[in-house]
Image: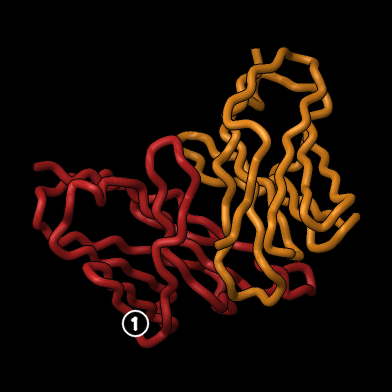
Chain colours: A red, B orange
């Protein structure tokens, strides 16, 4: 079973729409969680960390459900500039006995926002 | 801001060549990583290093080696390049502690002819 699974999409939405991405992770010992954004032919960039209580950054809201091992990202009032691939990322925290920051990446969900 | 710099954005090499990809970070991070990214396969970890001269295999180390002689520099080596190593290569770094996000370089798009 993959460490991190997410719906690859693509999601095609009009400007102003609300869109939600979901992600599940397999290791219950995972300690930290992130959403990254990757534009075409560019490197992944951190969009936001995900906290147990849920957190918001402008139009973006991230939620974590540790019991279900489920992470979500909600984008409200979509903009053309939101078009990108969104990567769900999990840090197990420990790897081969060390507190190494090994991250596990989902394959990404592609979003296209159209005018 | 963390800066991770990869030596080349685009590189074209021939089959059988020895290829060096260099990565430098300026934040004194202990941990550094090399990934490759291919369409439909996502990011796959090749090798990582948690200290100078220390290295660990990731999920797809075959055909690659690495070198970490200085803390700020992590090199990926393709011993004898093959066409199936044509890919986007991404370097990343992170401080020790386990709960931080990684910071990525711009990536090297490598083509093996």
Q: Name which residue lies at 48% across and 71% down.
A: A33
Q: On the rendered structure, is A84 left or right of B46? A: left
Q: Chain of mark 1?
A: A
Q: On the rendered structure, is A21 left or right of A93? A: left
Q: On the rendered structure, is A112 left or right of B111? A: left
Q: Label 1, on which residue?
A: A54
Q: Name which residue lies at 82% across and 23% down.
A: B18
The percent coordinates of residue B31 (x first, y second) are 73, 62
Does dot 1 land on a helix, a strand or a loop? loop
Q: Quadrant of the C terminus of chain A?
A: top left
Instruction: Give the image quarter of residue A59.
Output: bottom left
Viewer-proximal residue, A78 or A30? Answer: A78
User: Quick check: B47 above or below B18?
Assistant: below
Q: Residues within 10 Å of mark 1 (few under 14, many from 20)?
A: some
The percent coordinates of residue B43 (x first, y second) are 55, 46
The percent coordinates of residue B108 (x first, y second) are 60, 34
User: Quick check: B24 above or below B109?
Assistant: below
The percent coordinates of residue B55 (x first, y second) are 84, 54
Q: On the rendered structure, is A98 left or right of B44? A: right
Q: Name which residue lies at 38% across and 43% down.
A: A39
Instruction: Give the image quarter of residue B83.
Output: top right
Q: Name which residue lies at 58% across and 31% down.
A: B9
Q: Residue furthest bottom?
A: A53
Q: Quadrant of the N terminus of chain A?
A: bottom right
User: Quick check: B33 above or below B75?
Assistant: below
Question: How many numbered markers are drawn?
Answer: 1
């Amino acid at each position: 079973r993959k460490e991190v699974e997410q719906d690859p999409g693509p999601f095609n939405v009009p400007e102003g729409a609300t869109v939600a991405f979901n992600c599940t992770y397999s290791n219950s010992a995972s300690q930290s969680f992130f959403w990254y954004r990757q534009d075409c032919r560019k490197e992944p960039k951190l969009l936001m960390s995900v906290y147990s209580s849920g957190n918001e950054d402008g139009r973006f809201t991230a939620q974590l459900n540790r019991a279900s091992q489920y992470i979500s990202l909600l984008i409200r009032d979509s903009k053309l500039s939101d078009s990108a691939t969104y990567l769900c990322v999990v840090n197990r925290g420990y790897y081969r006995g060390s507190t190494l920051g090994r991250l596990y990446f989902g394959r990404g969900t592609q979003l296209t926002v159209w005018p | 801001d963390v800066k991770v710099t990869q030596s080349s954005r685009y590189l074209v090499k021939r089959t059988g060549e020895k290829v060096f990809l260099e990565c430098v970070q300026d934040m004194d991070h202990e941990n550094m990583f090399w990934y490759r990214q291919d369409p439909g396969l996502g990011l796959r970890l090749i090798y990582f290093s948690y200290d100078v001269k220390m290295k660990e295999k990731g999920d797809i180390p075959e055909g690659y080696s690495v070198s970490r002689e200085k803390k700020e520099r992590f090199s990926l080596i393709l011993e004898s390049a093959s066409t199936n190593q044509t890919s986007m290569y991404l370097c990343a770094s992170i401080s020790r502690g386990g709960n931080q996000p990684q910071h990525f370089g711009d990536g090297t798009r490598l083509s093996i002819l």
